[in-house]
Amino acid sequence: MTLLEIIRFAITGLAANRLRSGLTTLGILIGVASVIILTAVGNGSSQQIQKNIQRLGTNSLTIQQGGGGGFGRLSRNNQSSARRLTVADAIALTNPNAAPSIKSVAPVADANVTCAYEGSSSTPQNFAGTWPTYFEASNDVIRAGSYFSNEDVVQGKHVIIIGQTIVDDLFGTVDPLNTQITCGGQPYTVIGVLKKKGTTGFQDADSIAIAPLSTVQQSITGYGSINSIVVEAVSAPATDTAQSEIAAILNARHKIKNPAKTDYRIFNQASLLSTTSSNSAVFTVLLSSVAAISLLVGGIGITNIMLVSVTERTREIGIRKAIGAPRGAILGQFLVEATLLSLIGGIAGVVVGIIGSHFQIVGVTPVIVPSSVVLAFCISVAIGLFFGGYPANRAASLRPIEALRYE
Amino acid sequence: MTIAPQVPVVDIRDVKKFYGSGDTEVRALDGVTLTVYPGEYVAIMGPSGSGKSTLMNIIGCLDAPTAGSYALDGLEVARLDERQLSIVRNRRIGFVFQSFNLIPRTSAQAQVEMPLAYQGAKRQERREKALLALGAVGLADRAHHEPNELSGGQQQRVAIARALVSRPSLLLADEPTGALDTKSTQEIMGLLERVNSAGRTIIVITHEHEVAQHARRVVTMRDGKIISDEANAA
């Protein structure tokens, strides 16, 4: 009795009940496919979030007004003594001796203004007056035109670089370069257009306008405090050292004795990234476990159908035993039948899973985790062996005389 | 009948088979002794409940006796383990049942090949032997038919071909014509006679006198005991 022979018997057995075999296979198919697709969705969404954060610049740190340590709000007690962020703070951070991990610094003055061009208008979610270093730190790249220079800042030139959303709102199909738009009543010449960044949650990263700091201060915000300072660290791993260097410099400048009660906050993109990564890992585990349960249900389906099959074919088992089938041959036949069911379901599930992962699912482009394909497939085969084992053993243990009498 | 002392095919001594215990104990076999020599054609007769089917199951190694000894071809069956028993059933005994007991949705040829497959015979050898056996029962042209495409008589002939394909020392037939019409019955009985004249030992269990008449020796049972054992006049 060769294995090939047993497999042939098993295939004949399965083919005799095509509908039933098909439905059982479907259970495994759904399980395997959902494991693959759901892990792909989890993986895809976490990659999407990471990409969004990376787009904002992983090397960058943002210092904002406010404080009370980490992310707390300004408390009433120290509000009076709180110092605002100033351009001088930003300049202090550029000292390479005190802050060797800092590559560049860009003070940012935000304004809430509306820009207009020939009757159409648009309010940028982010209208920033800053230094040219801002572009690299915040990962803003132009696709047409040029950046403004330090000279433009010194001279307070009325030049502006705008994001795609503003271009769409104001110009439509007209080429925006070198045209003049009005923002907050002041004329600006568009000298550059930024590359599209996409949206991050509710934030439209392309609804942005960037002008020289001095120009914005002069015409809109005044020369007082600034809203934030964007700092670029020399490398992504250096962001933590850069953060402590910033804290040391600002604590000294703002005369803060208790580092837990600061009047500024530092946002670290890298730590944000790791937080969201671990969040999405939890999300992926959650999805996978739901999928794993459906795989388990598929396995129970196999046990169920194999038990029915053994009961239904008790007489056949008796006949086979009477003509001399050894225990191993019967055990093998039913085990192979169960394994074949799960194997076919597993292969079909992998195919469906891979095809299904090519579609966008609730706005997420799934990214297949190769190990999930291998794992789901192996588990489905193991399920066939494991859940088929009990019915197969029951079939093999039937006494021939009882099996033959069974009606 | 036999001149030289031969090893009996079936050597049953004082075999008992009880079911249940106490008040509900049923004595299906109550001390049966039977010896069948090679080449014999024996019919076992008796009313239902006489224990003839139980006896057949024990001879066929499908069931174990409660007490007594049974040697098949001189081989003490009680000493065999499950694996050895399956080999004995495969090589030494051919079964023919009243209800044919063919495997559904399987071609005649595959049915006949099955005992050889469990022996581990090669595909080519199996095919040849199976076709030969089907030819011997006159069904060479029905090799690819499934049971539901065959008449009762044809199904029983497939079963006989399956029983004989592994050249067993003993052919056991349990009411082989019980589900057949007169014409098919005659066909099957003629076939069994030819098999016997080719030297195969046959034990037929029946309650029909016409069937028993074909045998050379008739054993009659009642209440789990053999009440007569005589050579057939015909």
Image (cartoon, rainbow, N blue to C red):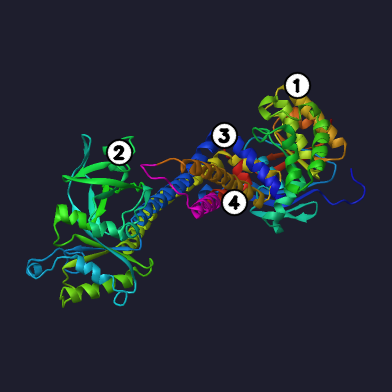
As helix, strand or loop, the secondary structure at mark 1 comes to helix
Mark 4: give few (<14), some (14-19) or many (20+) Cα within 10 Å: some
Asked whether the residues under marks 2 and 4 belong to the same chain, the reply is yes
For the residues labelled 2 and 3, the Cα–Cα distance comes to 59 Å
Q: Position of residue A238 (x, y in %)?
A: 36, 70
Checking the image for residue A18, the label placed there is 3
Q: Which residue is mark 1?
A: B183
Checking the image for residue A168, the label placed there is 2
For the residues labelled 2 and 4, the Cα–Cα distance comes to 76 Å
Q: Position of residue A150 (x, y in %)?
A: 29, 60
Dot 2 or dot 4, earlier in sequence: 2
- The residue closer to the viewer here, A50 or A267, is A267
Mark 1: give few (<14), some (14-19) or many (20+) Cα within 10 Å: few
Q: Position of residue A285 (x, y in %)?
A: 39, 55
| Residue A369 included in the magenta stretch of the image | yes
What type is the residue that disc 2 sits on? Asp
Dot 4 or dot 3, earlier in sequence: 3
Question: Given the image, what chain letter belongs to the residue carrying mark 4?
Answer: A
User: Would you say the residues marked 1 and 2 are in contact, meaning their CB atoms lie under 8 Å apart?
Assistant: no
Asked whether the residues under marks 2 and 3 belong to the same chain, the reply is yes
Q: Is residue B79 above or below residue A354?
A: below
